[in-house]
Image (spheres, rainbow, N blue to C red):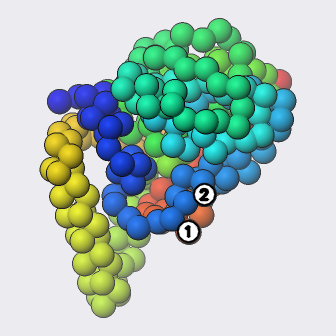
Amino acid sequence: MSFIDSFNQLSKTPSFLRSGRMFSFHLFLFKKIAREISLKLNLKKEDKILDVGSGTGDITQYIFPCSSITLSDNAPSALFIARQKKFFCPTDFKIVDLNKKLDFPNNQFSAVICYSVIHYLDNYNSLEKLFFELIRTTSPGGRILIGDIPLRDKYEANLKHRQSRPIINFIKNIQYYIKKETTNFFYRFYKINTAPSSLVITKPLLESILKNTPEIRRFSFLKQSSSLPFSDSREDLIIEKCL
């Protein structure tokens, strides 16, 4: 079972299973994520946006302002669902293989979104190639948001801090296992097969890749809003391409 197979299956389930996070009762989750992305990228009405790994467009449908937006994914069923949604901007759809060269010209998009994607790539070589491709397709001075990155080093630091506070750790563990088992229940109910283990991502790993990727003017890691579930172990990465 590959990630593509799992995402094709997930595309046919209710949206609360498609957030890239364990099950959580969270109203307007996709709207909140889209608003945070729009603010961090400082989107403008003239921006041409590429969403890499857009899935069913649950987040992208709330992205604005922009002049156009292209949704790209390697799960055909997900893009089929996305085509049925209404978007704020003129929209295009394209099937791509995220582990290979993206089928877009150089310097085409002024803003690129890649949200909850990179840990699902096949290997670390594909991760480096994707960074290069995101830069290549971004216009000079353009911005890239690689979002919802589950950082193993941040998770372990938070876990260590929790373990120093036994009562809080006990409560957090109960909450975690309830959400995990609830997620597993819905996966079984909708007959979603579990995909392979995802890549282990750390901040030093990403920094080493970024420092060896040409045409990057600057980059920064930004915390996610505390209102988003499981945000304490995830961050967003903003990259600006050289002029």
Q: Nearer the viewer, residue 172 or 182?
A: 182
Q: Residue at x 67, y 53 (%)?
A: 35
Quadrant in the picture for residue 12? top left
Instruction: Please state the horizontal and vertical placement of residue 42, each as a whole percent of the image.
Output: 78, 45
The answer to whether residue 126 of the structure is visible from this angle is no
Residue 103, placed above or below residue 145: above
For badge 2, the amino acid type reads Lys
Residue 226 located left or right of residue 116: right
Q: Nearer the viewer, residue 241 or 64?
A: 64
Instruction: Please state the horizontal and vertical placement of residue 125, each as a whole percent of the image.
Output: 39, 23
User: How many C-alpha atoms fall within 10 Å of the one at disc 1: few (<14), some, or many (≥20)?
Assistant: few
Q: Are marks 1 and 2 in contact (CB under 8 Å)?
A: yes
| Residue 52, disc | none
Q: Secondary structure at mark 1?
A: loop
Instruction: Please state the horizontal and vertical placement of residue 10, each as a whole percent of the image.
Output: 31, 39
Nearer the viewer's eye, disc 1 or disc 2?
Answer: 2
For badge 1, the amino acid type reads Ser
The answer to whether residue 162 of the structure is visible from this angle is yes
Residue 1, placed above or below residue 35: above
| Residue 227, disc | 1
Q: Residue at x 64, y 31 (%)?
A: 112
What residue sits right under mark 2 in the picture? Answer: 32
Q: Dividing the image into 4 quarters, which one contains the N terminus?
A: top left
Q: Residue at x 50, y 49 (%)?
A: 148
Quadrant in the picture for residue 88? top right
Of the residues under marks 1 and 2, which one precedes in the sequence? Answer: 2
